[in-house]
Amino acid sequence: VDLSFDLATLPKLELHLHHEGAAPPAFIRRLAQEKRIDLGKVFDAQGHYAYSDFVDFLRVYEAATEVLNTPEDYARLTTAVLEQSAESGVIYSETFLSPDFCGGSDVGAWKEYLHAIREAADAAERDMGIVLRGVITCIRHFGPEKARASAACAAETAGDWIVGFGIAGDEAKGKPKDFSYAFDMAREAGLHLTAHAGEWGGPQSIRDAISDLGVSRIGHGVRAIEDLALVDQLAESGVVLEVCPGSNVALKLYPDFTRHPIQMLRERGVKVTVSTDDPPFFHTTMTREYEALRLAFGWDRGVFAEIARTALDAAFCDAATKEKLA
Ligand code: ADE
Ligand code: ZN
């Protein structure tokens, strides 16, 4: 393994980041204290987020969002998140924003949250040079009706900053088809589409997300490796995977990086990118992901350059923004 090049300063693009999931635990603790909110069992003795499995992770994630209940909270969160990302050499980031957590999917409230987030993002771009765009994300286990309300918020705010629509949450609940209407609304509003699939669901979950939601990117998608015909289909169609290896290892989908399928997917021609998902929950950063991938697979400069190029091509921002990043 060639360890001679510095991964921390390599320019990175991140396509899969949950806004609340990127909140440092100290940030959430401070807000809870300020607001005198008792969060219950959220942190361990070291002050890290504490959860036992994926469903428990979702519980802790949603508990932490309880302290984030004003546009100003989201402005502060945005600054904290972008400082962390910039420290890892990230120059472009797409963050998942859920109107469910930002004003309860009310369009008027959502617009106020979005305004505050954008102001903080604009300031971060001026100060640190990092570019942020938003992907509105519905939550699968909240059901199709809430997803339609999120899609309505998305349609109202689609543009040069809100550039995509997606779905996260518990992949074991419901089917992609249940969310077709919400995705149709988002598509008609001109938004690019992505869906979490092939993380807790198998190959069929990925097939369904592509055929029933018409997405051009898949969040995770790593379990495509269990069906090589699907792997070939992904390679041929050019669907891009937002792979989050550290998240998959932390949530015990794979025992360690060396057993993670990202390398095999790449070798079979699938377009893969690298992201952190919910960095403090998984004790990761973009630099740590890169370091673990170099160690596990011996990736050299050329591979990391290819990953960055794939992410730039697959980014949902407009062509003028891509040109500035290239
Ligand atoms: N929400 C935040 N992180 C997630 C993940 N890894 N999968 C599904 N939903 C999520
Ligand atoms: Zn995710």
Image (cartoon, rainbow, N blue to C red):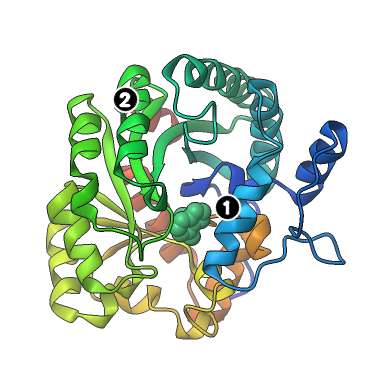
Sequence order check: which comes first, mark 1 or mark 2? 1
10 Å crowding of disc 1: few (<14), some (14-19), many (20+) = some
At x 50% / y 40%, what residue is drawn? 93
* Relative depth, front residue between 102 and 40: 40
* Relative depth, front residue between 199 and 289: 199
Tag in front: 1 or 2: 2
Residue 228: x, y in percent? 18, 80
Which kind of residue does numbered mark 1 sit on? Leu
At x 48% / y 16%, what residue is drawn? 111
Q: In the image, 64: left or right of 241?
A: right
Report which residue position mark 2 lands on: 152
Report which residue position mark 1 lands on: 10
Residue 268: x, y in percent? 23, 75
10 Å crowding of disc 2: few (<14), some (14-19), many (20+) = many
At x 41% / y 47%, what residue is drawn? 142
Relative to 14, residue 149 above or below:
above
Q: Are marks 1 and 2 in contact (CB under 8 Å)?
A: no
Quadrant housing the C terminus:
top left
Task: Count all numbered tags in the image, as a single digit.
Answer: 2
Residue 304, numbered label: none
Quarter assignment of residue 106: top left
Q: In the image, 299: left or right of 272?
A: right
